[in-house]
Amino acid sequence: MNKKFISMIGAAALTLCLVVGGVVVSGMKTVASGTQITLSVESPTVEKDEEIKVIVSASSGEAMSYIKAKLTYDSEVLELVETSGVQLSGTNGEVHVYETLAYGENERNYELTFKALEVGSANINVEEGNIELYESLELINVSASSLPIEVVKNTTASDDARIKEIAVAGVKDMNSTFNPDVFEYNLEVGVSMEMFLYSATAMNADSVIVAPEDLMLDIGANRFEVRVTAPAGNEQIYVFNVTRLDHELEEESEVETVEETETETVVETDSETVVETESVQESETEAIEVVPTPMPVEESETLNAEPLEGQAIEVVE
């Protein structure tokens, strides 16, 4: 009983030593830890819009019969454009490499070509991998690994990331106050404006303008960042601090006031017209009253009237 217990302890200690020492133990067979999948590149730095070649290497001290690996990368920074010597599948941002080696090989290399889309950092990762050994048929799980890539500004492309002109809904004459070299603005809009809506044109036609994800305007202070990326990869941010009032802007109020004044003027004009009409009517009435009518001749006036030449005067007694 004691001998069996001691034997078990010894076996456990031996297994621990083998694992720490870099040997993978599986059943009664052992395989050197040199079985691996690695990533390498000539230079980890690449300019925006340029290409970079990454080598995926699978190797083992014993001949391999099957290789399988899952690789991931940042698809916003890198785009896989070409492969060489590899069978692969997967979606954007993920690649599955697999190959069967009929006669067994100790090393296999695969070439992946990526295009740098944006300035920034990205990692190409071996998430998981398996290698089957040719003679022992052991399936070895390889360790995860990562290759950092740095995408930098393209020195041959335009680096002008400015906005040429911009119009913001609810803001009058924005272009007259906009300056491409001023990168922050304080704006006010009326309560009727519920979203930050704008139209912008970049200095360089190949620049990319990206709007904020959330364009809704709350009553009060709101902050929006409009990002412009130049062809060279550098970025410029324009900040718009938009205050949405709980009423309409004064300019809009003035317009309403002008309309009301015009209405009043029209009313007053109509009223004056009525008065004038009434006045005209009164004048006409007065004119009718003033028109002379035949009056009876009184006796006294007849007696005192001077005789007219060629006219007989008859005196009535």
Image (cartoon, grey):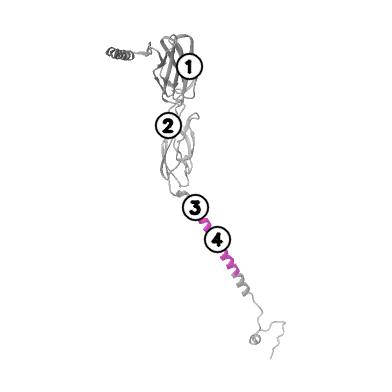
From the top left corner, tell me how far across and down residue 211 is, in percent: 46, 35
| Quarter holding residue 63 | top left
Q: On the rendered image, what quadrant is the C terminus found in? A: bottom right
Inter-mark Cα distance, 2 to 4: 58 Å
Residue 11 in sight in this render: yes
Q: Which structural element holds mark 3?
A: helix
Instruction: Give me the residue at 50% from left, 56% from top.
Output: 261
Residue on which the image places disc 3 = 256
Pick the front one: 223 or 104: 104
Residue 42 in sight in this render: no
Pick the front one: 161 or 75: 75
From the top left corner, tell me how far across and down residue 43 is, in percent: 41, 17
Residue on which the image places disc 4 = 269
Q: Which region is colored magenta? A: 258-281
Instruction: Give me the residue at 52% from left, 56% from top.
Output: 262
Residue on which the image places disc 2 = 236
Q: Amino acid at mark 2?
A: Gln
Residue on which the image places disc 1 = 98
